[in-house]
Amino acid sequence: MGGWLSAAFGSPRVRGGSRRRARRRLSLNQATVNGLELREAAQLCARHDIPGIGLWRDRVAEAGLDGAAALVRRAGLHVSSLCRGGFFRYKGESPVALFGAPA
């Protein structure tokens, strides 16, 4: 993880113990618990010793970047990925055109 994502969310907290070292790459994709707010998902990870979370942009936007970063830091998590959102489901309009790119 690098760049602005590292700057916003920080680096993973170093954890001790052989069981924790074996699980250091474990991450929960936020869509797995889509009914939970970011705060609840972060608490769930911390409670179950899951060191990483894969965030979704819409959920980060709901909490605000600074708020999301603070939640992740307080839970002692690292961000394993930042997903953009769902799949293109628009009929009759090019996905390229949706973002204003020339066709």
Image: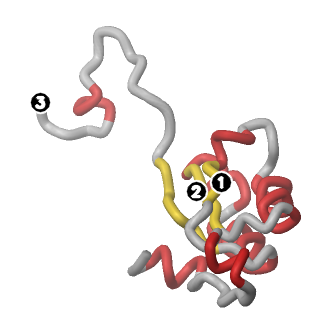
Q: Is residue 72 above or below residue 34?
A: below
> The disc labelled 1 sits on which kind of residue?
Leu
Q: Which residue is mark 3?
A: 103
Q: Nearer the viewer, residue 91 or 87?
A: 87
Residue at 72% from the left image edge and 79% from the top image edge: 73
Identify the disc placed on residue 54.
2
Amino acid on which disc 3 is placed: Ala
Q: Secondary structure at mark 2?
A: strand
Q: Please state which of the two labelled residues, at mark 3 or mark 2, is closer to the viewer.
A: 2
Q: Amino acid at mark 2?
A: Gly
The reply to whether discs 2 and 1 touch (Cβ–Cβ < 8 Å) is: yes
Q: Earlier in the sequence, mark 2 or mark 1?
A: 1
Q: CA distance from mark 1 to mark 3?
A: 37 Å
Q: Is residue 90 left or right of residue 33?
A: left
Cα–Cα span, label 2 and label 1: 6 Å
List x then y, in percent, for residue 18. Answer: 69, 82
Q: Residue at 72% of width from left, 71% of height from top?
A: 72
Tag 3, which secondary structure? loop
Residue 27 image point, x, y percent: 61, 59
Residue corresponding to mark 1: 28
Q: Nearer the viewer, mark 1 or mark 3?
A: 1
Mark 1 or mark 3, earlier in chain: 1
Picture residue at 39% right of the left edge, 25% below the top: 88
N-terminal of the two: label 3 or label 2?
2
